[in-house]
Image (spheres, rainbow, N blue to C red):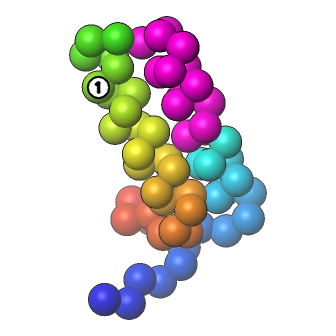
Amino acid sequence: MNLKINGFGLDQAIRIILGIVLVVLYLFGFAGGGLGVLLSILVATALITGIVGFCPLY
């Protein structure tokens, strides 16, 4: 499968930084229960799309 990179520079940096901030919030207990699960999904999405450079929503 050949994925076309559609995330560039600033976009990727924002996604990675957002993912790191969300991980810190989760690890320090600012979110638990259902909010923690939602936060985990957002973290995974932000980090993976930021690192890989491909976002399927584009």
Q: Please tell me in which quadrant of the rendered image residue 22 appears.
A: top right
Q: Please tell me in which quadrant of the rendered image residue 11 appears.
A: bottom right
Identify whether 46 is placed above or below 2: above
The answer to which of 17 and 55 lies nearer the viewer is 17
Q: Residue at x 47, y 10 (%)?
A: 29
Q: Is residue 39 shown left or right of residue 6? A: left
Q: How many numbered marks have been drawn onto this rendered protein structure?
A: 1
Judged from this view, the residue extending furthest toward the bottom is 2
Q: What's the magenta region?
A: 18-31
Q: Residue at x 70, y 53 (%)?
A: 13
- Judging by the rendered image, the residue that carries numbered circle 1 is 37
Q: Please tell me in which quadrant of the rendered image residue 25 appears.
A: top right
Identify whether 41 is placed above or below 51: above
Q: Residue at x 62, y 30 (%)?
A: 21
Q: Is residue 57 shown left or right of residue 29? A: left
Q: Secondary structure at mark 1?
A: helix
